[in-house]
């Protein structure tokens, strides 16, 4: 697995990422130290889901594994769950150009 495991329960994939992925179900209130900074979960996070490492403004790119994976649709605070209610995921979505190529 790429990245740095933190607290034996999450992984920080690449420098510059603004989200961290939970490896286990995590309870609100749990604190992680990532890059020398504390991040306290403000809500429960399910395994495989991401939480914000830093504040992410609406319209800002959500970064995971060194690349943009979506755009925040609402402000996201550190320790908050990052999912469809506050971000629009774009990484696994085919581009409009690719969809046109497939129709040809």
Image (spheres, rainbow, N blue to C red):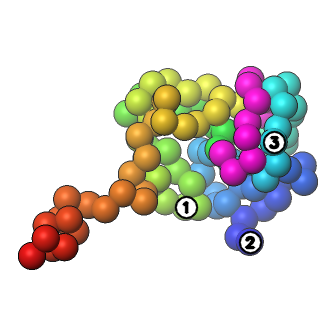
Q: Residues within 10 Å of mark 3 (few under 14, many from 20)?
A: few
Relative to 95, is 40 on the left or the right? right
Residue shown at 49% from the left, 29% from the top: 85
Label 3 secondary element? loop
Image spot of residue 15 (x, y percent): 64, 58
User: CA–CA distance between discs 1 and 3?
Assistant: 24 Å
Q: Earlier in the sequence, mark 3 or mark 2?
A: 2
Which mark is drawn over residue 52?
A: none
Q: Secondary structure at mark 2?
A: loop
Q: Secondary structure at mark 1?
A: loop
What residue did someone put label 1 on? Answer: 66
Horizontal and vertical percent for residue 77?
61, 26
Which residue has dot 2 on it?
1
Residues rendered magenta in the picture: 39-49
- Give the percent coordinates (x, y) of residue 98: 22, 68
**Residue 75 in magenta stretch:** no
């Amino acid at each position: 697995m790429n990245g740095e495991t933190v607290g034996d329960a999450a992984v920080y994939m690449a420098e510059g990422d603004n989200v961290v992925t939970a490896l286990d179900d995590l309870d609100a209130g749990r604190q992680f130290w990532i890059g020398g900074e504390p991040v306290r979960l403000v809500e429960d996070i399910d395994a495989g889901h991401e939480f914000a490492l830093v504040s992410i403004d609406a319209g800002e790119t959500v970064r995971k594994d060194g690349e943009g994976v979506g755009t925040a649709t609402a402000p996201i605070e550190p320790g908050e769950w990052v999912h469809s209610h506050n971000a629009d995921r774009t990484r696994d979505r085919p581009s409009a150009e690719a969809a046109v190529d497939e129709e040809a």
